[in-house]
Amino acid sequence: MAGKAKEVAIGKRAKISQAQQYMLLAVLGAALFLGAAIAINYHLIKKISYHAGVISKEDESIVEYSNTIKKIGICTAPKGDVYSTEELKKCDPNNIEVSEVPGTLRSDIVENMAANKALNSVPKESLSGCANPETGKNYKYEELEKLYQDAESSEARAAATQMIKICSALRIIPDALPAFKNEEALLSSLNKIFIESDWQPESLSPSGEEEAAEFGEGLNAIAVNLSVESDMSTTARLINNMERSIRNFNIKSATFEWSGGDISFSANAQAFYVNKASLAESSYTVPVEGK
C-alpha cells in the first residue's frame, strides 16, 4: 500500500510540474505576443503621427498658396476655401476682368495707382510709344482703360496691360525708385535736370561707388558727386530742380564758395533703388519622432 501511494504522489507531482511548464510557456508566449504588439503599435503610432504632420503642412502650404493667388488677383476667387486643381488649370490671368477680382493687388494697381492724377501729371514727352495714333497725343488713362476693356483675346488684353504699365501713372514708380542699380538711368535723370536748369556740365560719369542706405531694409544707395560753378541764379535753379525731381536725391554734405559773381557748389549725395520684389518660398522638414 505504501509503495502504491508513493507512486500516486510521484505521478501527481509530475502532472503538476508539467502543468507548470505549460503555464510558464503560455505566459512566456503571451508576454512575447504582447511585447510584439506594443512594439508594432508604437511604430504605427509614430508613422501615423509623422504622416499626419506631413498632411498638416501640405494643407497649410495649399492655403498659403491659395491666399497669395487670391490677394494678388491672378485668378478669380475659388468656390471653396482653396483652389482646386481644375480651377487652377482653367485660370488665365489675361482673360480675367479687373472687376472680377475686387480688393486685390491687381485691381488696386490698375484702378487706383494707374489712374492717379497726381502721378499722371508728370510729363510723358520721352515716351514715344505711348502716342495714340487716332489723336497723335499721349494716351490718357481713360483711353488705356478702354483698350483693356475692349480687348477680345488673351493676347490683346496682355498688350493692353503692358500699355497701362508703361503709359499710365505706373511708369512713375520705377522712375522714382528703380528696382535695380541703373547708373545710366540716374545720369539721364541728372542730365535732364541740368538741361532744365540751363547748365551744361563739363563731364558726367558714374561715381562707381555704392553706399548703404540708412532708411530701411531693401533700400540701396548710389553715391552721386556733384560739382557746379556758375552764377547764383543758375545754381539756385539747379538745386530747386533737383528738389522737385521725381527721383529722390539725399544730399549728405554740401559746400558753397563765392568767387566774384559766380558761386561754386559741391555736394555728396545719394540716389536710391530697391531690391527687386519677389515671392520667397520657404521649406519645412517634418521631424521623425526619436530622430
Image: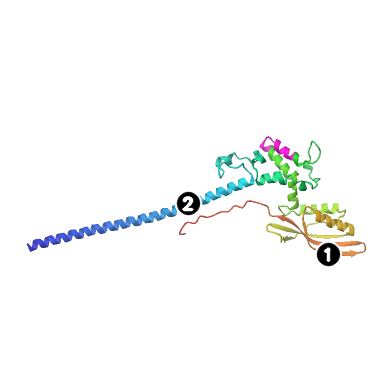
User: Residue 113 location, x and y as percent?
Assistant: 72, 47
Query: Can you say whether 63 is above or below 214 in the image?
Result: above
Residue occupying the far top of the picture: 152
Q: Is residue 208 left or right of residue 83?
A: right
Query: Residues in magenta?
Result: 143-155
Amino acid type of the residue that numbered disc 1 sits on in the rendered structure: Thr
For the rendered model, the colour scheme is rainbow
Measure the alpha-carbon separation of dots 1 and 2: 68 Å
Q: Quadrant of residue 20?
A: bottom left
Q: Is residue 45 left or right of residue 187?
A: left
User: Residue 21 location, x and y as percent?
Assistant: 23, 59
- Residue placed most toward the observer, 223 or 196: 196
Circle count: 2
**Mark number, residue 84:** none
User: Residue 123 location, x and y as percent?
Assistant: 80, 47
Which residue, given by chain and number where applicable, does mark 1 sit on? 255
The residue depicted at 84 percent of the width and 60 percent of the height is 227
